[in-house]
């Protein structure tokens, strides 16, 4: 065991013990924490294969980024692949992410993810384990660990899971724990999505992005708008706010209200239309995209 680690043990009778974990079958008697922890109102697990594709990692990272921007805690297992991408996405958003380990809190596995674990702790997140410090990570413990990933979360999102992925065990636990189970679909000819697609057949909710997840959690209002606005530049934000306040403006009207040149307004409007944030009516006037009003 490493020296000078700030490890905290929380027992079930401690007020800080997550209520969500108390409710699940085979609830742990206690959990060990390294980092910043408080029982969350909103936590979402994002899990998937260790042997992920660049596309799968992009989906996981983007989803985690956007959900973290919305104040969601991103929960995963610190494994290679989808887990790591989810943790990284939350960190890049300046959000909170928790890594649930399959061994002692001082035994980061895989060891090559120690830097990622340190970033989680140094930020607003933490490492969590039900195993005492010094416990080595054994294969069967990772399956048991998965019940904590789902148990501490409102919902589990599975991204890119083959037929025998450990992420499917997390989804099965989530079903039993009465948590929402969501899955991102993939090609029926790709082995990488065989497990994900099967979950959807078994009742998992099909989701494509963070906006879909938020909608399923009852947070549809403003969700798409806030997610889409994350990557806008300052001029685009000015134009969006003006059009939102008074729809049906043309380029000259928008320029007068934003103090931007007609050329700049035209260029930024083109970007906003491509991003499906603003629509052109066909008469040279602009309105908020119908997709943000759904």
Image (cartoon, helix red, strand yellow):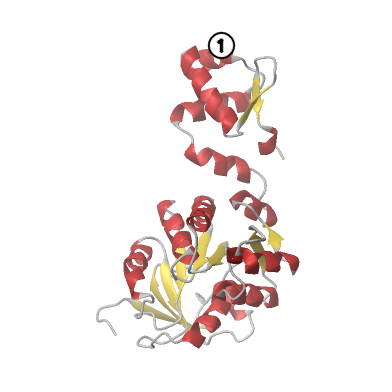
> Residue 213 falls in which quadrant of the image?
bottom right
Q: Does 63 sit left or right of 246 as displayed?
A: left
Q: Position of residue 108 (x, y in %)?
A: 36, 76
Query: Which residue corresponds to the image point at 46% horizontal and 56% vertical from the top-left?
Result: 90
Secondary structure of the residue carrying tag 1 is: helix
Is residue 259 visible in the rendered structure shown here? Answer: no
Is residue 238 visible in the rendered structure shown here? Answer: yes
> Residue 170 falls in which quadrant of the image?
bottom right
Q: Does 42 sit left or right of 202 as displayed?
A: left
Residue labelled with disc 1: 252
Q: Position of residue 152 (x, y in %)?
A: 56, 72
Q: Position of residue 219 (x, y in %)?
A: 65, 51
Q: Residues within 10 Å of mark 1 (few under 14, many from 20)?
A: some
Looking at the image, which is closer to me, 246 or 229?
Answer: 229
Q: Does 282 sit left or right of 251 as displayed?
A: right
> Residue 199 falls in which quadrant of the image?
bottom right
Q: Position of residue 180 (x, y in %)?
A: 68, 66
Looking at the image, which is closer to me, 45 or 207?
Answer: 207
């Amino acid at each position: 065991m490493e020296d000078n680690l700030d490890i905290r043990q929380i027992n079930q009778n401690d007020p800080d013990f997550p209520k969500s974990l108390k409710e699940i079958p085979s609830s742990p008697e206690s959990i060990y924490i390294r980092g910043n922890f408080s029982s969350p109102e909103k936590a979402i697990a994002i899990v998937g294969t260790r042997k992920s594709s660049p596309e799968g990692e992009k989906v996981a990272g983007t989803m985690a980024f956007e959900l973290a921007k919305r104040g969601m805690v991103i929960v995963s297992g610190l494994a290679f692949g989808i887990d790591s991408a989810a943790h990284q996405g939350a960190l890049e958003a300046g959000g909170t992410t928790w890594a649930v380990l399959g061994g002692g809190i001082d035994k980061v596995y895989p060891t090559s993810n120690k830097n990622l674990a340190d970033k989680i702790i140094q930020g607003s997140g933490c490492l969590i384990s039900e195993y005492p410090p010094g416990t080595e990570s054994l294969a069967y413990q990772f399956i048991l660990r998965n019940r904590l990933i789902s148990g501490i979360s409102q919902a589990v999102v599975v991204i890119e899971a083959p037929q025998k992925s450990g992420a499917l065990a997390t989804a099965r636990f989530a079903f039993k724990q009465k948590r929402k189970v969501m899955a991102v679909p993939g090609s029926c000819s790709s082995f990488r999505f065989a497990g994900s697609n099967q979950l959807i057949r078994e009742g998992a909710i099909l989701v494509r992005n963070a906006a879909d997840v938020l909608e399923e959690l009852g947070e549809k209002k403003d969700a798409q708008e806030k997610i889409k606005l994350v990557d806008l530049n300052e001029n685009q934000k000015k134009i969006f706010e003006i059009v939102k306040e008074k729809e049906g403006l043309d380029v000259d009207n928008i320029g007068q209200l934003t103090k931007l040149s007609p050329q700049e307004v035209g260029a930024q409007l083109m970007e906003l239309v491509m991003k499906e944030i603003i629509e052109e009516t066909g008469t040279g006037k602009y309105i908020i995209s119908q997709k943000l009003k759904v």
